[in-house]
Amino acid sequence: MKLSRRWFLSSLASSLTISSLTSCNSKQDTTKAAQVSQLVFVNPSNPTTFNYPLNDSAFSVFGFLYDGLISENGLTAELEPALAESWQISEDKKRITFTLREGLKWSDGEPLTADDVVFSYNEIYLNEKVPTGIRDILRIGTSGIFPSVKKLDLRQVEFSVPEPFAPFLRYAGGIPILPAHALQESVRSTDEKGNLKFLSTWGTDTDPRKIIGNSLYRMASYTPSERVIFERNPYYWRKDKEGNTQPYIERIVLQIIENPDTQLLTFRSGELDSFDVAPEGFSLLKREEKKGHYTIYNGGPDLGTRFLSFNLNQAKDSKGKPFVEPIKSRWFNTLAFRQAVAYAIDRETMKNTTFRGLAELQHSPLALQSPYYLSPEKGLKTYQHDPEKSKKILLDAGFKYNDKGQLLDNEGNLVRFTLLVKAEEKVRVDAAVQIQQDLKKIGIQADLQVINFNVIVEKLQSRNWEAYVGAFGGGGVEPHNGFNIWYSQGSLHQFNQGPQSGEPPIRDWKASDWELEIDRLFEAGVKELEENKRKEIYGKFQQIVQEQLPLIYLVNPLSLSAVRDRVKNIKFSALGGAFWNLYELKIMQFS
């Protein structure tokens, strides 16, 4: 699947929002834990590569190894200096000049300069021979033109874009800078098959000590299916106000534990410092909070979205067969039908039962934390549970009921469709079951199909589906993070997936007028740099989504995490999690 900006931004933070342990499973590590301050984080799987641009997994080592030119504050989402001490935007908004900190070094002690920045962008991220999803992040607007990057001097780099592009600073500035002295030769040479040597460089079979970074830690060792060990980077640039070197914690162990039940048991036994709390486990963990010497932090609603969606695609495959049965396609593409379904879903009950009250009703494609979020109080349309209103809307639209209370369309067809949901997430399945029950009350039969997520992805990509209970992970506060979802030609525009490169041609695909209006708004939003005008643009986008309901939003679980009280200076938020400020965390006692 083509990587989206949303995937990229969420993956940047993934290594710092995972759970942590206080001890390892080996005698050697336990002994070392008594000598140095350390945290042990949990990954559910092995890293797939040590080569950042080639990574396609959210579970990786890179959050500890690399910084970009700028960073995002985990509480406010404001941009802050990182490798660059400052930046300046030209008057025409088409050029950004970054000035690097003086004396920057790589984890092997070599100097980090503007040459590394230019190398990272021009020879890796913008290199068509390097298959990386990062390149999508750097495309400017719908034209897809890339920026130009040039060195001004050893500490200054200039980025130029063909047109003003509001998200560019956040996107481009946050991408990790890579070491030219270690990787340039592999990018400029090929193997006997003509492939760049870079593509086979820094795999997980590489000696971890040879992986060179620029962030808080550097790798010391890797044991597959067991752990990755990091040690503090002695050349890291960050210092506190008193001039002390950061981070304070000397050692990180990334423990690989696949089973979430095992993680919960380990936390309850006192071995974990942190644990992401699911709604079904909250009551148990809350009762043990004082005894377990931890605090459960509540960051408010998660930044992701959960929704019910219908397949609105009216196109045909290369053989002329409709992707969606025409009878059902007429229902799904009838606005009154989608709105009636929205009124039928009892989100309050879903919040209080499936999510144990640990959630908030969701009404918008944008996170509550985003400055562009349009609240119901400011005019965003909402759908409160009202099954009688649902029935009236359906009757007014030409549907009717038989003597068994079943809904029929105006041609007498029984309204019945298949509802997909992934099997791996219990709360999502429970939500789908409730949707099934709610729709039955207005005469609609939804046949639940609980299947493996990989199968669902295949169905979505092939357009072979009718209805789907899905979710998108949090992509931060920038609305354009959802571009691939909302742009009519986007690779994640699942509810009406258009033609995609590399696949068989499809026939008669078209985007609706409201989809094209969303396209126009997104195109306008990225060119507009005045904040109030951007808010107005994305406010209109949210109103269209809630009126047209391509995604019927459900509820959003709270972001909850239990962290041991011995870890100090936690600044928890849904945006950054518990460890976004890892550099300033301290452990007040060693285990």
Image (cartoon, rainbow, N blue to C red):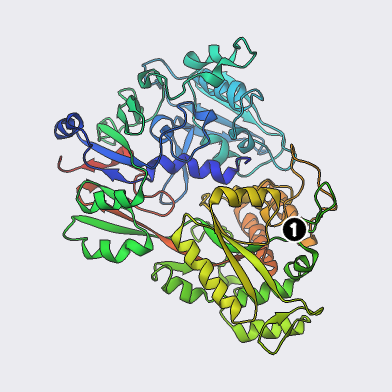
In this picture, is 483 found above or below 341?
Answer: above
Q: Residues within 10 Å of mark 1 (few under 14, many from 20)?
A: many
Closer to the camera in the image, 524 or 465: 465
- Residue at point 77%, 80% (across, down): 397
Q: Which residue is mark 1?
A: 515
Where's residue 358, x and y in %?
A: 39, 67
Left/right of residue 66 with respect to residue 242 in the rendered view: right
In this picture, is 275 found above or below 211?
Answer: below
What amino acid type is highlighted by mark number 1? Glu
Where's residue 58, x and y in %?
A: 47, 41
Where's residue 42, x and y in %?
A: 33, 42
Q: Is residue 343 visible?
A: yes
Left/right of residue 194 with respect to residue 16 in the rendered view: right
- Residue at point 64%, 65% (across, down): 418
Left/right of residue 332 with respect to residue 384 in the rendered view: right
Residue lying furthest bottom: 403
Left/right of residue 260 with respect to residue 96 in the rendered view: left
Task: Identify the element where label 1 is drawn.
Answer: helix
Q: Quadrant of residue 171?
A: top right
Q: Quadrant of residue 558?
A: bottom left
Quarter containing the C terminus: top left
In this picture, is 138 found above or below 550?
Answer: above
Quarter containing the N terminus: top right
Where's residue 330, x and y in %?
A: 78, 68
